Amino acid sequence: MGETSGTLKVRGAMNRPNVLVVEDDGPIADAVVYALKKDGMDAEPAPTLAHARARLAARDLVVLDLGLPDGSGFSLLGELRLRTDAPRVIVLTSRDEDIDCVAALEAGADDFVTKPFSPRALVARARAVLRRAAPREASASSFRGAPDGGAATTSSGLVVDGERRRVTYAGREAPLTKLEFDLLATLAEAPGRVRTRAQLVARVWGDAYALTERTVDSHVKGLRRKLEEAGAPPTVIETVRGVGFRLVEGA
Ligand code: CA
């Protein structure tokens, strides 16, 4: 979407994404910056929160470590959430810190990568997050039954038609319940993006509902079964262990 803040920022227009790598571990930061640059992006390291805050202007993406010398990456995540021109965020978490992943996604992060990771894997995630930047903005406020008022092909063969509330795979319709459709439509807003169970509950059932994780899981299970019956591969909705679900990109 157009950036019209009156600054000279031309985000994305030069198709050379600008990434800030907020990470105090020097070798990791260097490897990530190197890999991003090698992939054609502009990238710069920031070893502290203070450094990051001073260097945020005109970034498309922030790679954010959560444990920094002058505080938690969560505080920066919270600040970014309040900005209308906030960059995308990929959070770096330590191995098996599922709670951090969940909390980061719910605090507005677009994705997470678990340490240890390969710089190339991070570059791939960065590309995916930047690629789907526009669709999320377009549909952020309009979802309630009709993600963006029209049909959306989410991966090869799978079509989520928000207007008619129909889902087809290679032309075969999957007879979904209202809840199943809303679940799929939420995931289809951003294929590849992980949604936590709490995010799905908030979007599909509403904030007032306190559902158990098992309830969410059983609805996802039903959704998966019906998509499979329509011919979709079982992997089309991926379970991200301990975190949530995502619609596989280009499945
Ligand atoms: Ca750290």
Image (cartoon, helix red, strand yellow):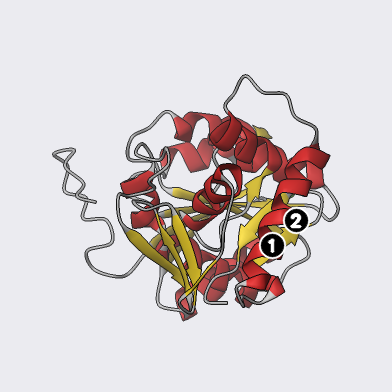
Look at the image and tell me whether residue 46 can be seen: no
Residue furthest to the top in view is 208
Circle number at residue 224: 1
Where residue 6 appears, as percent x and y from the top left, is: 13, 39
- Report the residue marked by disc 2: 221
Identity of the amino acid at label 1? Arg
Disc 1 vs disc 2: Cβ atoms closer than 8 Å? yes
Q: Position of residue 161 (x, y in %)?
A: 39, 58
Residue at (52%, 48%) from the top-left corner? 186
Q: Position of residue 216 (x, y in %)?
A: 73, 42
Secondary element under disc 1, as helix, strand or loop, is helix
Image location of residue 118, percent across then percent down: 70, 74
When the figure is inspected, residue 41 is found, relative to residue 213, above or below; the finding is below
Quadrant housing residue 222? bottom right
Q: Residue at x 32, y 40 (%)?
A: 85
Q: Nearer the viewer, residue 89 or 128?
A: 128
Q: Residue at x 62, y 40 (%)?
A: 200
Left or right side of 148 for 8:
left
